[in-house]
Image (cartoon, rainbow, N blue to C red):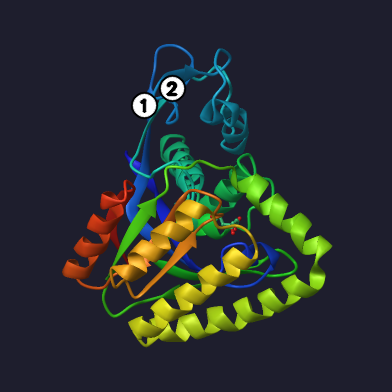
């Protein structure tokens, strides 16, 4: 059976969420699909980075390096033979949760094939542990959106328990994702911010206080479908991320292009320093105009929706 993990955008609260503030994320139609298929020899998988089939004990690739972890989780002996067939339409430059979508899809595929009977909650837990392979201190927001889909309010409590609540919009809202084409490592961006925050506690205390009130306001604006306010709050969230030095020339340019093309709001999404941004563009016409403006500037645009 083919199963999946969803890509996601963070609408509000990336980075802050690592320190226990709430975040709002929305799963995308973009996804990683996975299926375990019986095989004659060895344990193999598709490496989504190189597009090659890789084998346990012979190759090194994220999916193969993670395989011992998955075998242990599902009590599968190494002499079982199978092929993990993978496909993805989640861009890998960063920001759209491709690693979380991958580990959720793999967890679900192993769960199906080896009949482990894991619930979504257990799948999410395994995926969270696997995410640590990609970046050391994930908050858990990416794997949660990748597991459950839809729009979620997510907060990591001080004791590491998680509060998750669904946010239901009255109807889906069009967005455009702008891909800078610049790759970066989430772990490094998170670590860099940690150091800056430790070196300048006063500055960051103020930014974090603003981010906290902003995310609560954003939740109400989304629930009330006040899209102009949602857009304005996205712009303010982007400004806070700029102040924390996690934006980049390309991300800022894409945000400017989006706003010049009448998007209601624009911000980077995910770790920043590269990867992707998103623009709030309700209605097909506005979505089309902003997407065209991105491609005119030489960037990749993805038209999709949230909620
Ligand atoms: C990455 O998609 C989002 C970050 O907040 C890291 C995390 O939450 O683990 C930057």
Q: Residue at x 37, y 88 (%)?
A: 224
Residue 99 against residue 258 in the figure, above or below: above
Q: Residue at x 35, y 86 (%)?
A: 226
Q: Which residue is denoted by mark 2 in the rendering?
A: 82
**Labelled disc at residue 133:** none
Extreme residue in the left direction: 285
Residue 301 percent location from the top left of the image: 30, 52
Helix, strand, or loop for circle 1? Answer: strand
Q: Which residue is denoted by mark 1 in the rendering?
A: 37
Q: Is residue 81 visible?
A: no
Using the rendered view, name the quadrant where residue 89 is placed: top left
- Foreground of the two, 134 or 125: 134
Q: Residue at x 18, y 67 (%)?
A: 284
Mark 1 in CB contact with mark 2 (< 8 angstroms) = yes
Q: Is residue 300 left or right of residue 73?
A: left
- Foreground of the two, 165 or 135: 135
Helix, strand, or loop for circle 2? Answer: strand
Residue 151 against residue 91 in the figure, above or below: below
Q: Is residue 282 left or right of residue 60?
A: left
| Mark toward the start of the polypeptide (1 vs 2) | 1
Residue 279 percent location from the top left of the image: 36, 65
Count neighbours of disc 2 (C-alpha within 10 A) and say few if under 14, some if 14 to 19, many if 20 or more. some
Residue 274 percent location from the top left of the image: 51, 48
């Amino acid at each position: 059976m083919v199963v999946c993990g969803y890509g996601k955008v963070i609408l509000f609260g990336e980075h802050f969420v690592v320190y226990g503030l709430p975040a709002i994320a929305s799963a995308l139609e973009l996804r990683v699909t996975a299926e375990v298929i019986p095989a004659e020899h060895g344990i193999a998988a598709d490496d989504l980075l190189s597009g090659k089939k890789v084998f346990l004990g012979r190759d090194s690739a994220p999916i193969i390096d993670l395989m011992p972890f998955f075998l242990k989780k599902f009590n599968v002996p190494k002499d079982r033979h199978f092929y993990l067939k993978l496909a993805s339409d989640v861009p890998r430059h960063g920001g759209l949760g491709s690693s979380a979508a991958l580990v959720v899809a793999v967890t679900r595929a192993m769960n199906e094939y080896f009949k482990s009977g894991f619930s979504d909650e257990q799948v999410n837990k395994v995926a969270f542990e696997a995410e640590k392979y990609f970046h050391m201190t994930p908050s858990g927001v990416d794997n949660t959106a990748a597991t459950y889909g839809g729009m979620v309010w997510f907060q990591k409590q001080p004791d590491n328990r998680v509060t998750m609540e669904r946010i239901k919009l009255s109807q889906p809202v069009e967005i455009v994702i702008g891909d800078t084409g610049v790759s970066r490592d989430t772990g490094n961006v998170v670590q860099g911010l940690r150091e800056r925050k430790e070196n300048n506690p006063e500055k960051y205390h103020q930014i974090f206080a603003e981010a906290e009130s902003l995310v609560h306001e954003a939740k109400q604006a989304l629930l009330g479908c006040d899209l102009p306010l949602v857009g304005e709050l996205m712009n303010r969230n982007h400004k806070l991320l700029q102040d924390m030095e996690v934006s980049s020339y390309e991300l800022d340019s894409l945000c400017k292009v989006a706003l010049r093309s009448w998007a209601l709001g624009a911000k980077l999404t995910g770790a920043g320093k590269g990867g992707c941004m998103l623009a709030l563009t309700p209605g097909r016409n506005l979505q089309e105009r902003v997407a065209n403006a991105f491609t005119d500037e030489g960037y990749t645009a993805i038209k999709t929706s949230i909620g």
